[in-house]
Amino acid sequence: MALPPLDSPQWNSRWLAFGWGLRSVTQTILTLVLFATYLGIGALAHDTHFSLLWALCSTLFVWAGPAQIILITTLGSGATIIQSAIAVTVSAIRLFPMVVSVLPLMRTPTTKRRELFFAAHLTAVTLWVECHRFLPQVPRERRIAFVNGLGFGLVSVCLTANTVGYFLAANLTQTLGAAILMLTPLSFLFSTARNSREAADVVALALGVLLYPLAAKMNSGLDILVSGLVAGTIAYGVHWWRAVRA
Amino acid sequence: MSYAQLIGDWQALVVLFVAGVVPNQIWRMLGLWFGGGIDEGSELLVWVRAVATAILAGVIAQIVVQPPGALASVPDALRYGAVAAGLVVFLLTRRSIFAGVVTGEVFMLAGKWWLG
């Protein structure tokens, strides 16, 4: 499927643009990755004793895979609400630069802030990547409707995946249940590795994985924050050192 | 499937909003309100991104090292082996997420079947 040319009557209404955004969901491999990830999140929610409604609400209102997994694993392993909230909010800081960089792509001189509300809510790594790919092919005054359609489609795919994953975890044999739970760490590891452009990103990812077991031995309840801060700061040090040398 | 599994209690939903929705959403709304004059390449944001990546890496490690639910039935060596095998194929296929995930899954399932 190719999008219609910029001057096509196919862009004449907002609803048509919404429909093109919706259909673009089928045009990206990331939809499949998201499906696998949210299948895993549904299974994870089941195995850590959250309800299906809870899992669906987290997808609808949080709409950030890493934050959802952090929330489920920390609460599930007995962290306090404050500890979970801190881990979630630190993981979510990256959404700030994403929103800041993606909204100007859709803004026109007459755009009001509230028209961008849903686009801001829908912004997460997948939408951010796809906006940079698709939006140059969409007339500027139809971009908000297009992004809303694309985001609506992605959220629907993920809600379906959550439900399927939840029921599979409840009904499958232990081995297949384990296979679905394993989708989450695998898909996150490789999609994060794929998005790593700089040496600092790779260092943060690798050290973050390796330092966690050490931090967990301290048993402070803040394991993930400790290993994340140390590994992230060392990675920043690598970035700084390379910039100074260059 | 019981009522508790489908709907659950309202306290859990309150915890979801307090510990999950608000701390996550606040950054998007800040981006929407104050988006104008921030340089995406600023040093502070580079550090923030590195810490966020490392926290996510820690979560990935936590699921593999201290597995929840059914995943705990898989021996340690098989889980670590699945990640390692997936990583090797991911790198060999010029960073194909799909190939890496499928390899990790096949490795774990084959190992589980072989061990009986």
Image (spheres, grey):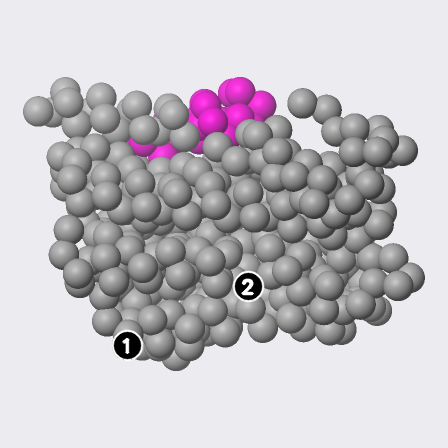
Question: Looking at the image, which is closer to me, A61 or A18?
Answer: A18
Looking at the rendered structure, the secondary structure element under dot 1 is helix
Q: Report crowding for label 1: few under 14, some 14 to 19, many 20 or more residues within 10 A (C-alpha).
A: few
Q: Residue at x 82, y 41 (%)?
A: A12
Find residue A137 and report its horizontal and vertical position in percent.
Answer: 81, 35
* Residue A144 within the magenta-colored segment of the rendering: no
User: Residue A115's quadrant in the figure?
Assistant: bottom right
Residues at marks 2 and 1 on the same chain:
no
Find residue A60 and report its horizontal and vertical position in percent.
Answer: 46, 58
Find residue A152 and report its horizontal and vertical position in percent.
Answer: 56, 48
Is residue A214 in view from this perspective?
Answer: no
Task: Tell me which amino acid carries mark 1.
Answer: Gln
- Mark 1 belongs to chain: B
Q: Report crowding for label 2: few under 14, some 14 to 19, many 20 or more residues within 10 A (C-alpha).
A: many
Q: Are marks 2 and 1 in contact (CB under 8 Å)?
A: no
Q: Which residue is mark 2?
A: A92
- Mark 2 belongs to chain: A
Magenta segment range?
Answer: B81-100
**Dominant SS in magenta:** helix
Q: Residue at x 50, y 56 (%)?
A: A63
Looking at the rendered structure, the secondary structure element under dot 2 is helix
Q: In the image, is B19 to the left or to the right of A177?
A: right
Q: Reply above or below: B5 against A169.
A: below
Q: Reply above or below: A83 against A66.
A: below
Q: Give the mark toward the camera: 2 or 1.
A: 1
Q: Reply above or below: A149 against A234.
A: above
Q: Residue at x 65, y 50 (%)?
A: A148
Task: Tell me which amino acid carries mark 2.
Answer: Ala
What distance separates the C-alpha of mark 2 from that of mark 1?
A: 23 Å
Q: Which residue is mark 1?
A: B11
